[in-house]
Image: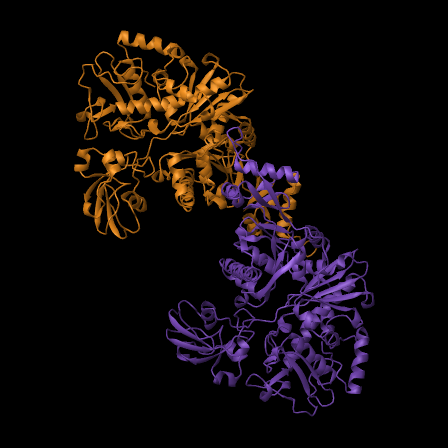
Chain colours: A orange, B purple
């Protein structure tokens, strides 16, 4: 219904909104970011808001809301923003509680990066031209290109936008001109006089975050970094929600593309400002992301990525003019999109391999890039296989009752005394706890397993005598932080359902590692290194992750954190065309394994839901430690 | 001054206009095209309008207006639209007399065209793809490109706009797809299923007119033609006025580019509608035009084209994406701009050569493409030289008291009885005469010379006894049509000043032919063929043009009309990449001769102002005929 006036607290944003069907749509129109993981389907319960005024202008609570919200919640005026329909015109005041606010998240920018020879795709060449005369009336552009040819040994093409500027630029520079060449094949920019500084921009487009790096390509160093949440989040927090959103309306792809491009343009402005560089001085850009993010950024429909047999629309690397993408750098510059591998194994996995170098090693290594989708690569110089697991957003805090992103107030690590069941924790920003982020969820599950609060099947041991263990709304729950110590108006608990979510998520990841190992006929002992990549992979406690059986039971010294390797790969490709060639080679070499096509998939998955695993002999190190831990009453949880 | 309300009669257009400084600007804003040859400098007197109401809201008559308009004119309310400044707000009613209206002009679309092998830059290839499966998850784009590669033997690139569409198109076509390939190197379009029809668009951008051809590239035939006035005319009728306009403000280049692109888009829509073709079905385009028109269309500043040593900004042929030019055809298509030769010898001259084939002949030929700038090419297989003459717009009707464009009511041919001095004439559309177009101006000068109304120096013989010869405002004038037979409220006369204009214009052209001949050391007898090109060249009486000494005195059977060769060249380049290669070759081969640099230029020019020439022995055929004509009292003027 048209023309309601919305006020969103605590933002103080007040606007007349026309054409919004739901409170969530109104918030999006106004620019208030409300958490929404399921993409507005009434499933995740993350868009809880409180209606402070104007309840009468909204529809009454839907079935979905009655399912997700408790009686108390409903009485207190809680609604799901995505399900609360605007019924008629009027003034509606909405409070967005902290847990539903999308904050700036702690973003990981660092990542390992192997040294590459400095050989960017762009370079500058300064030429001095003869002035035309009545006996030499060669045209401006031909004069310039011939001079460049005599310097580089081949005649380049010239980009249209650069070409247009030639007559004015060569006279402004008094017949001394600097051209920027792309791969020696094309003049993409012309500047008056002699200049040498050359900049490039590398972007890692994550489902959740954008990480960007402004690089000085002459010096081969990072001049500035910037990061932000992916502005597509309000349209769905995971890849599948966004693909569904795109399939709903033919304009939605453009909408999401514009959102991410605007986010990148924002990062360009920010990084440039910090480094004192003008955006037009950026003459090259690289981009890595999962296949859906890659496709959406390029405006390619990702519709079929999510449908069996999950083909990517584009696997090869591609160079697209920045202006065609409306990316605001030099108009003649190209954006190089790293290759993808398959529908759910994208340029981020290619970058993982590139950055860790496992494709060049004799030893067998595994990379696990944990996210809503987890990409796993297993291989060495001789062979590379990869798969993707739908591990879900549990480790991003979704589907977990008190789950939240890694923002201020999130418990990032915790430990449970196996004898007293007391809980210690550390929060981001040392604020009062508001919930748990992914690494703490793993700590909780591992700690509860060690303390035998849950058994190997994940069931709560309700016979334990501690006030922390109690019966909740539907089943057991374990109190991590009491209301009086918390930053929210509630005890912070782990529920039986939360543990189930963890079991499903870790089982998905372990199944991926297991099927890849089976297909390559290798055992855990043969894996020389396991690289944990991505933000979650960087903060998770490796021992606890191993305790719950997230990855094969290898000695901990073989586990390495490599940080944001997607960003590292994008940077390497920006610094060196050799890295681009290598990435293309990698993408071609990797054999994609579709887990669902493996006949043992169901069995593997079910067995892996056990903690650490149904076949305990596959986790002999862990089992040994669990027995020892309980006996000694120690917390074996490390504190990274 | 802001906010005056203008009514323009007879258009009936009435609008409140803000920010217009002059009546001409107000007319341009409203969309009323008033003739303006000098570009609003108060020199040409072609923008005469009558102020019917609101005189008090305009400035009083300027010096320029007093110089150009007669006492009577001023008393009758005549003003120059470009000099009548808006002084304050109010209602102003302006009548645009017929002679100041820019009408649709008779446009020449036909042109000779040599047969070229049908080998367009684009072609269609239909491929049938295997559907992806769990054991074959190759990406959509790679699948398509590999299939195309196996058909054409090389792997093409794919245009970004085509690439984006691949996933939806291949499924829409149930895995049968037709790609359009550009030069076998790039996929520029994808369509579902099997299609074969292929269209291209050729445009000749003249200073005055746009001529366009929609070609079926499969059949090699013209599907539709369209033409219109160049929408840049209101900004200045000749090349120099437009270049000055561009130099006045940095946004003016964009303004002129947008004007011509919008004109072309209009022609595309019109031609497509007539042929039942969608604009997106046009997959290729070619463009020929003089250097300034070429540059402005491409958005390249033509500023230096008009400054010594008159270098072109771009000589080589160039392919620019239609979308970068905002030309509304297939977004992946290229626009191929034919090469230019020098600042004042453009792609139109290249097209002249291409269409006439003089570059392949053993015999020496000359092409004269007559316009405001006249391009002259002299040469054969061994050598080609070219020059440009500033012949001025006299043959387009400018600077001639009753001169007008070749529109309805224009006298296009006339003949004068050398004994009675009676005048016969034929008008375009058989309407009552309103003025003279270029071909009639030549007829008038030649007829008056034959009848000895003027002498060889162009001076009026005021002793003749005929009421048609009389003293006008400033000097003699000869009445061609009396007021009672005319379509305007005045006698139509030729003035002494008009004859001077003709002398200057024809002298400029003849000087060009003469200096080219001198530099190639050839005499008129050695010239095997003279091709008269362009609209004026097509309608002019060749004998009369020779009588006044416009071109060398060769036997008339050697003179050929070739029509709009610029359009022919653009069509040939559209039909055949061989023609493009040939055009590039031609542009490189032609030696540009800068007339101003020839030491004999001044003398040559002064001698050529005589009718037919100061050195009468250079026009022995003409002199023979002039004597005979007068003796017999015949009109030797042909009636083509």
Tell which of B255 and A241 is nearer to you: A241
Where residue A202 appears, as percent x and y from the top left, is: 47, 35
State left or right for residue A246 relative to residue B554: left
Where residue B584 appears, as percent x and y from the top left, is: 69, 52
State left or right for residue B32 relative to residue A93: right
Q: Quadrant of residue B594?
A: bottom right
Vertical placement of A212 versus B363: above or below?
Answer: above
Tell which of A637 and A394 is nearer to you: A394
Which quadrant of the figure contains the N terminus of chain B?
Answer: bottom left
Vertical placement of A430 versus B35: above or below?
Answer: above
Q: Quadrant of residue B606?
A: bottom right
Residue B412 in view here: yes
Which quadrant of the figure contains the C terminus of chain B?
Answer: bottom right
Where residue B316 appears, as percent x and y from the top left, is: 65, 51
Tell which of B120 and B85 is nearer to you: B120
Q: Residue at x 41, y 76 (%)?
A: B92
Where residue A113 appears, as percent x and y from the top left, is: 47, 25
């Amino acid at each position: 219904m048209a023309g309601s006036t919305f006020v969103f607290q605590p933002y103080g944003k007040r606007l007349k909104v026309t054409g919004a069907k739901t409170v969530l749509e109104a918030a999006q129109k106004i620019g208030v970011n409300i958490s929404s993981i399921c993409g507005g389907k009434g499933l995740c319960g993350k868009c809880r808001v409180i209606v402070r005024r104007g309840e009468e202008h909204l529809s009454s609570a839907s079935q979905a809301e009655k399912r997700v919200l408790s009686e108390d919640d409903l009485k207190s005026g809680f609604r799901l923003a995505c399900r609360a329909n605007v019924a008629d015109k009027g003034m509606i005041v909405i409070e967005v509680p902290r847990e539903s606010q999308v904050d700036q998240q702690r973003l990981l920018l660092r990542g390992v990066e192997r040294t590459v020879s400095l050989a960017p795709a762009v370079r500058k060449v300064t030429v001095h031209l003869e002035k035309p005369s009545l006996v030499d009336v060669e045209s401006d552009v031909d004069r310039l290109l011939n001079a460049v040819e005599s310097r580089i040994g081949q005649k380049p093409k010239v980009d249209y936008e650069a070409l247009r500027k030639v007559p004015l630029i060569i006279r402004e520079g008094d017949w001394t001109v600097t051209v920027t060449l792309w791969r020696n094949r094309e003049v993409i920019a012309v500047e008056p006089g002699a200049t040498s500084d050359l900049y490039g921009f590398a972007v890692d487009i994550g489902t959740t975050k954008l990480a960007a790096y402004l690089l000085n390509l002459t010096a081969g160093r990072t001049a500035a970094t910037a990061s932000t949440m992916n502005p597509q989040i309000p349209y769905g927090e995971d890849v599948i929600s966004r693909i569904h959103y795109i399939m709903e309306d033919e304009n939605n792809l453009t909408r999401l593309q514009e959102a991410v491009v605007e986010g990148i343009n924002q990062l360009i402005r920010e990084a440039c400002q910090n480094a004192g560089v003008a955006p037009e001085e950026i003459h090259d850009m690289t981009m890595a992301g999962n296949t859906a993010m890659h496709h959406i950024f390029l405006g390619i429909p990702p519709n079929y990525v999510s449908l069996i047999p999950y083909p990517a629309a584009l696997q090869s690397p591609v160079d697209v003019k920045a202006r065609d993408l409306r990316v605001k750098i030099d108009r003649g510059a190209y954006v190089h999109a790293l290759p993808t591998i398959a529908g759910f194994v994208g340029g981020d996995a290619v970058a993982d391999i590139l950055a860790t170098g496992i494709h060049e090693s004799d030893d067998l290594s595994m990379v696990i890039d944990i996210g809503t989708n987890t990409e796993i690569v297993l291989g060495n110089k001789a062979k590379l296989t990869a798969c993707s697991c739908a591990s879900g957003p549990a480790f991003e805090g979704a589907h977990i009752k008190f789950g939240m992103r890694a923002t201020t107030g999130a418990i990032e690590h915790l430990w449970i005394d196996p004898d007293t069941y007391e809980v210690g924790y550390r929060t981001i920003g040392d604020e009062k706890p508001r919930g748990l982020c992914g690494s703490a969820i793993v700590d909780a599950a591992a700690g509860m397993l060690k303390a035998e609060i849950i058994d190997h099947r994940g069931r709560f041991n309700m016979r334990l005598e501690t006030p922390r263990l109690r019966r909740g709304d539907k089943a057991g729950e374990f109190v991590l932080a009491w209301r009086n110590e918390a930053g929210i108006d509630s005890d912070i608990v782990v529920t039986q359902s939360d543990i189930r979510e963890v079991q499903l998520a870790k089982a998905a990841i372990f199944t991926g590692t297991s099927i890849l190992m089976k297909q390559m006929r290798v055992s855990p002992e043969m894996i020389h290194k396991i690289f944990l990549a991505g933000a979650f992979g960087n903060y998770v406690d490796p021992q606890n992750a191993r305790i719950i059986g997230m990855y094969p039971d290898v000695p901990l010294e073989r586990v390495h954190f490599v940080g944001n390797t997607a960003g590292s790969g994008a940077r390497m490709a920006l610094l060196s065309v050799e890295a681009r060639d290598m990435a293309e080679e990698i993408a071609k070499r990797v054999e994609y394994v579709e887990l669902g096509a493996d006949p043992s998939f169901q069995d593997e998955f079910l067995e892996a839901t056990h903690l650490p695993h149904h076949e305990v002999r596959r986790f002999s190190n862990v089992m040994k430690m669990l027995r020892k831990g309980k006996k000694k009453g120690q917390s074996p949880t490390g504190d990274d």
